[in-house]
Image (cartoon, grey):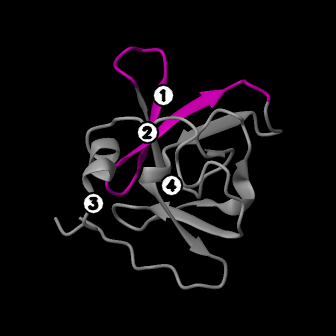
Amino acid sequence: MNYNKLKPEEERVIVNKATEVPFTGKYDNFYEEGTFICRRCNVPLYSSKSKFDAGCGWPSFDENFPNSVERVPDPDGMRTEIQCANCGGHLGHEFLGERMTDKNVRECVNSLSLRFIPKGEELPKTIHE
């Protein structure tokens, strides 16, 4: 597969489903206009308009682009993992019912799973299997 080449720490999170240390990610306290895409395959995942400050230490979104994210129960049965629907890359976890936004959803995403494309810049081509 010819997905984007990942650095070791990105592969640890995206492929091996690790979690980056809270409050250390590039996009935690980041509020520019644009689109967040999957670092591994370039699929557009989130608009910057859906990002909010949840105070949890990771970028949080209350809405993803249609059909961009897949939800999978964690083996522990306690949480729901979110993955890129195109490449299966680990993004983070989804939490419901916290009432942080009107949509009542928090998709807590590792910065290492994302790449930001500023508003006005062309999105890179998606890499499909």
50 in magenta: no
Q: Is residue 16 above or below residue 7?
A: above
- List the residue tagged with mark 4: 67
- List the residue tagged with mark 3: 6
Callout 1: SS:
strand
Task: Determine whether label 1 and label 4 are within 8 Å by CB.
Answer: no
Q: Which stretch appears magenta? A: 74-99
| C-alpha distance separating marks 3 and 4 | 24 Å
- List the residue tagged with mark 2: 20
| C-alpha distance separating marks 3 and 2 | 15 Å
- List the residue tagged with mark 1: 80
Q: Where is residue 5 in the image (x, y as percent from the top left)?
A: 24, 66
Callout 3: SS:
loop
Residue 88 visible, this angle: no
Of 123 and 129, the residue lying toward us = 123
The residue depicted at 34 percent of the width and 61 percent of the height is 40
Tell me which amino acid carries mark 3: Leu
**Labels 1 and 4: the sequence-earlier one:** 4
Residue 91 visible, this angle: yes
Q: Where is residue 99 in the image (x, y as percent from the top left)?
A: 79, 28
Foreground mark, 3 or 1, reads: 3
Of 41 and 56, the residue lying toward us = 56
Tell me which amino acid carries mark 1: Thr
**Labels 3 and 1: the sequence-earlier one:** 3
Name the quadrant containing residue 98: top right
